[in-house]
Image: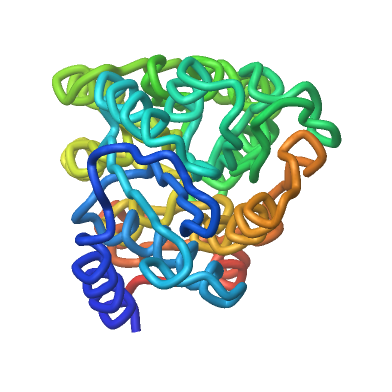
Amino acid sequence: MFGMRRREFITLLGGAAAAWPLAASAQQPGQMPRIGVLTGFENDPEGTAQLSGFTQGFQELGWTDGRNVRMDVRWPAGSVERMRMLAKELVGMQPDVILAQTTPVVAALQRETRTIPIVFVTVADPVGQGFVESLSRPGGNITGFIFTEGAIGGKWLELLTEIAPSVKRAAIMFNPDTAPGGGLYFLSSFEAAARSLKVEPITAPVHNDAEIETAITSLGREPGGGLVVIADIFLLVHRAPIILGAARNNLPAIYQVRAFARDGGLLSYGADAVDIFRRSASYVDRILRGAKPADLPVQVPIKFEMTLNAKTAKSLGLTTPPSLLLRADEVIE
């Protein structure tokens, strides 16, 4: 089913390519409304599935790219520099609304415009980042859909010690340039859970593959190490060396996004990003019909998913508790 969705999406991209001009044109009366999309990374199943979620939700509301709306999609692929460049380019096109994925992407767009409506997806702390005044009253040109709340940092560690009770030291990995609050957003709940579980908490800020490897190797030097990985856009793009490093160093790890578990990571738990993208279509629709972002309250996730890679658990010598198997939405054998 996913392969089919992906093919449909690629066809959609091909058909729409002609309708995605590079030069801005001011909207004339009767002209098609235009939306900019600044999201994730191209040629990645997770990125395409998420954008498909949006386009399907958008089509259900009566909007089809190239027929009654024009969509300009740009993929920053985890590079902050590229995010800033593409944010400038999209704002220059003067779209009616911009759909923006992740905290650094919204920050880049906010630097460029305080007037064009922006609907964010997979942002963690919009109030702390200064994107909105409050969740119930955003107050400016930005609103959207939260991906996760800070308390989940503790939940990740609880789940990790449930599947790997031998964990005595756990590192939380993030890129300070792309993680919510520079990585601090999840830290207090992670540290509180570590205290109650009698686990030593370690912070592992990383900026490149070499730092990822160093952090994982040093954690794996002694037994009892465990890893919690925040899925900021950088780590999502660089997930292969993390999964490989954890396997090599015999480290049990929990991740925020199912793509990690599907690619060989042990366990993932977090909000369903495809569902959030699908739901975000309703806000883009309402703004195109005249609603103001300031009046649309920020929405929290309603659907969470847990993916367990049983093959990885076995290779780590872990016995999965039946309670965890029952709670998993997907078990990879």
Q: Is residue 23 left or right of residue 53?
A: left
Give how far across and how far down residue 24 sits, in percent. 33, 37
The number of discs equals 0
Q: Which quadrant would residue 243 be assigned to in this image?
A: top left
Q: For the view shown, which residue lies furthest in the front direction?
A: 29
- Residue 327 vs residue 135, the one in the foreground: 135
Give how far across and how far down residue 139 sits, in percent. 79, 26
Quadrant where the N terminus sits is bottom left
Q: Which quadrant would residue 2 be assigned to in this image?
A: bottom left
Q: In this view, does 105 lie to the left or right of 48?
A: right
Classify 310 as above or below 302: below
- Residue 228 vs residue 77, the one in the foreground: 77
Give how far across and how far down residue 15 sits, in percent. 23, 71
Residue at 49 percent across and 62 percent down: it is: 54
Determine if residue 23 is in view: yes
Q: How is the image coloured?
A: rainbow
